[in-house]
Amino acid sequence: MPGFSSPAIILRRTAYAEYDTILDLLTLERGRITAMAKNARKSKKRFAGILEPFCCLDAVFTDPSARSGMTILKEAAMTAPFGAIRLNMEKVAYASYWSEMVNRWVKEDDTQSALFHLLHYVLFMLDSGKASHADLSILFQVRFMTLAGLFPGMAACRVCKTEIDRLSGSPTLYLDIARGGIVCHRCGGEGAGSQYRKPLSRGLVKQFLWVRETDLPQAERMRFTAAAREQGLAALEAFVTYHLAMEIKSLKVLQRIRHW
């Protein structure tokens, strides 16, 4: 039966029937796919310990059959278990949020090689423990929105069109969720308490732009103050969920864990 092979990251797994497992995966070659691992929960040898969320695999698939319409995971070898993520509740929450964003946004069989490399990179760094979980999430969301064509306009105020470098007075700007970009303190102050308008310092906006434009290893070195981190997460998470136009269930779990 025709098929294909590709590196793949497991986004979600679901038990199916008595012994099978349904997997949502982001593949390097074909984007997001849904595949069945037959007898995965019965066999102790075939897929033993490798079909865990966030694992990276070298996988071989059969193409969907005319009868079932389902792609089958034929064989797989683990290339990166990212096991340290699953030992820490907060790491699991962040990885689940990123994976759900990808799973909900990427269409089936829509190749997204840059997104595959981005997700693999942040999972690797999260697993390694070498970077702040929150800083990695800011990095991921900024780069994800850029790849998705959703990155907010941050060069100038969306209302008065003044470039941020030319603004005088208060250093506070606002991310207007509905307008899809930054508004200045003069144009945005009235709605500052709204759930659709989040405060951002001018310095944080410039950090977002730098993270967006530089290469990943350099962008990962960016460090945020506690205040900037809190502002950044609140603004980006609100923006992502609004513009994806869908509820991301894992985000609610993440936010509860973060505030324990």
Image: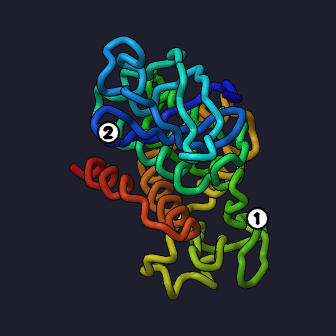
In the picture, measured across the screen, residue 187 lies left or right of residue 70, that is: right
Q: Nearer the viewer, residue 210 or 27?
A: 27
Q: Residue furthest front?
A: 67
Whole-angstrom CA distance, mark 2 to mark 1, is 33 Å
Residue 4 occupies quadrant: top right
Q: Nearer the viewer, mark 2 or mark 1?
A: 2
- Find disc 1 in the rendering and name its residue: 155
Dot 2: few (<14), some (14–19), or many (≥20) neighbours within 10 Å?
some
Residue 200 place in picture, x, y as percent? 55, 64
Q: In the structure shown, which secondary structural element does the residue marked by tag 1 occupy?
A: loop
What residue do we see at 56% from left, 61% from top?
201
Question: Which amino acid is tagged 2?
Answer: Glu
Q: Residue at x 30, y 23 (%)?
A: 42
Q: Residue at x 53, y 29 (%)?
A: 73
Compared with 168, 120 (above or below) is: above
Q: Position of residue 24 (x, y in %)?
A: 50, 42
Q: Pinpoint residue 86: horizontal percent, then vertical percent.
A: 33, 28
**213 left or right of 174 in image:** right
Label 1 crowd (10 A; few <14 / some 14-19 / many >=20): some
Do the numbered discs 2 and 1 sit on residues whose CB atoms are within 8 Å? no
**Residue indicated by mark 2:** 90
